[in-house]
Amino acid sequence: MPVIALQGCFTGIEGTPAISDSVVKREKIVSKPEDSYLSGIKPQRFGDWVVGKQWYVTDGKIRLIFGNQPGANDIQEGDIISYSHVDEVTTVTGDKVAEIVFVAPSGANVSYRTSLSKESLRAAERVEVPFAVEMSVVDEVNKIMLGKTYYVVTSSWYDMANKSRSGRRFVPVKVTDVSPGNAYYPVLLTLDDEEGKPFRLFMSAGTDAPMPRRFGAMFALSDPRQRYPEINDVTWQHIVKGVVAGGMTREECRLALGAPATVDRRPGYSILTEIWTYEDGKYLIFEDGVLRSFRQ
């Protein structure tokens, strides 16, 4: 049997391959109520669409899916288009496919040709409209979240001009508005922090939504501080601000900065050195699980 050599970091004793952030994340995986909080929200099956169902246009490029049809060139980002009906047309190859007909803001009908037959379309679990957000998803999130207070666990905030900025973690925030987001993250939340200062977060919805912006990755239903009574107040304030300090533990650093991109473990004669690196250039160096040096 051939022997496969693993490449790792040379320590003079032994090497271990670099591991990914998933190893760090797996250390304390538990099922949380936040993970299923919005699980019932999902795009409607085509068979459940009704006349007048609305989509918010996230990009004027939606004109491309309608071609040169009258009224298509007038559709702009921020417009609302609504479902009218479905037609069946024959392509140049003789195939019969469904065309979904929408009503543009001008009142003109514009058709989006799919690659499915009418029967297949009606049976489809999900039909995406490019460059558009299904308003029923936004409306369902609005019913659940508007006016509620949660604890934000992400520091990736946006200002009121939708420009990215670094925020604080584990502080109470109140949802003051729910509106359409973009084609990838369909919900845009406006919130006030505990000081009454507004900010925004883009969010996905449903269990099949993109992981980094699901509710469970962005919010906690109860105060996270209560889960860590062993962490002193000074260290907790570092965590809230998203910074680290010498002497913090691996868990405290993970709470402050999130899981690293890679972890490099280097066993020595009497000490275990661990190096965490992040995609933005940050790195942390631990000795026996305690932070000794870092760049942040």
Image: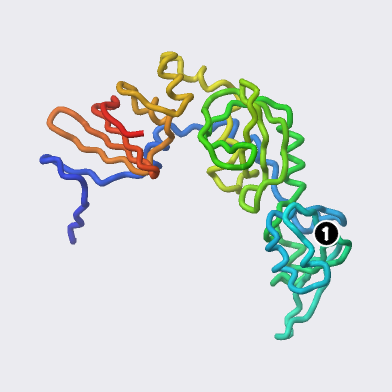
View extreme (bottom): residue? 93
Name the residue located 82 percent from the left edge and 67 percent from the top edge.
71
Image quarter hosting the N terminus: bottom left
- Residue that protrudes farthest toward the left in the picture: 12
Residue 286 in the image: above or below residue 188: above
In which image quadrant can residue 61 be found? Answer: bottom right
Using the image as rendered, state which of residue 193 and residue 197 is in the foreground.
Answer: 197
Residue tagged 1:
83
Query: In x, y percent, where is residue 226?
Result: 52, 17
Across and down, in percent, residue 293 comes to 27, 29
Q: Where is 196 relative to 185, above or below?
A: above
Decide if residue 114 is on the left or right side of residue 200: right
The amino acid at mark 1 is: Tyr
Q: Is residue 42 left or right of residue 72?
A: left
Residue 53: x percent and y percent? 82, 53
Looking at the image, which residue is at 75% across and 69% down? 66
- Where on the picture, by quarter, is residue 259? top left
